[in-house]
Amino acid sequence: MTDFMTTDELILQLKKQKNSNIGEKVQLEKTKRIRKKINKKTIFKIVTGIAFLHILFITLPLVLPNRAINVLGYANMIAIPNTQELDTELYQRVVTVHPFKLEDIEVGDKVIVYGRYSTSAYWVETVVEIREELGEIDTSFDGFIRYTVQIEDLDFTFVRESSFLGVIYFTSSNLRGYLVMLSTHVLILGLVHYFFINEKKKK
């Protein structure tokens, strides 16, 4: 004999099923929110780690004996590139250099010379002759006039004109620029944490 549910029993069963579905949906929404919050925290931790490494990278030159050289063996400085004519208005650029080593230099390479034409600036000049036995190197800025430089007076070899990141690094290589860079990192991380991680419950 088949048992049939009464109308009241059927209604009660439907209510239980509806409540069960609502409970599952609520639990699913909670799980999604938790996962979303975990993902945000993970991304924030990764960004914080990258920021920490960058701060460490720009901090080392300030505490090392040779403050100009970074951990990769390069430096950024302001110099006058020799890609312009002497008879025009000369401009300076932030350039990337590395420490001068005679064994790495050959004719055609570029070096950094200080104080050309009685200025207090660094100049990028091309090597046209090397006389190692005399301790001298001939360089030229415009390709016509040659100058003799003592090897012991050369500190840097030109690598390239700095990129945007190189300019930022150069700015942060002095104390004032470093403090501005550090403050910017802290401000950005603080804002990201406040608006995306530390979310307040809405009523």
Image: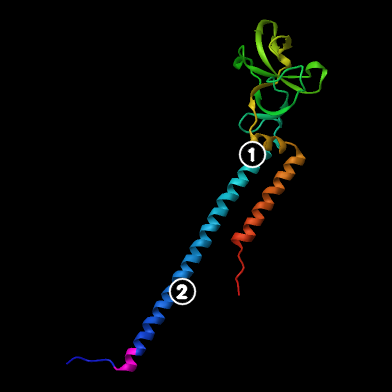
Query: Where is residue 185 drawn, in percent x and y?
Result: 67, 48
Q: Nearer the viewer, residue 199 or 151?
A: 199
Residue sitting at x 60%, y 72%: 202
**Measured from the top left, where is residue 40 in percent x and y?**
54, 58
Type of amino acid under label 1: Phe
Residue at (65, 32) in percent of width and height: 70
> What residue would you read off at disc 1?
57
Q: Which residues are magenta?
A: 6-10
Q: Residue at x 69, y 12 (%)?
A: 139
The disc placed on residue 10 is none
Task: Give the answer, above or below, for where 15 lies relative to 92.
Answer: below
> CA–CA distance between discs 1 and 2?
47 Å
Q: Name the chief secondary structure element in magenta.
A: helix
- The reply, left or right, for residue 106 in relation to residue 174 is left
Tell me the amino acid under the disc marked 2: Val
Q: Left of 95 or right of it: where is 25?
A: left
| Mark 2 burial class by Cα count in 10 Å: few <14, some 14-19, many 20+ | few
Q: Which mark is residue 26?
A: 2
Quadrant of the rendering where the C terminus is positioned: bottom right
Q: In the rendered view, tell whether residue 16 sits above or below residue 192.
A: below
State the SS at label 1.
helix
Residue 95 is situated, as x and y percent measured from the top left of the image, at: 68, 28
Quarter residue 199 falls in: bottom right
Q: Secondary structure at mark 2?
A: helix
Earlier sequence position, callout 1 versus callout 2: 2
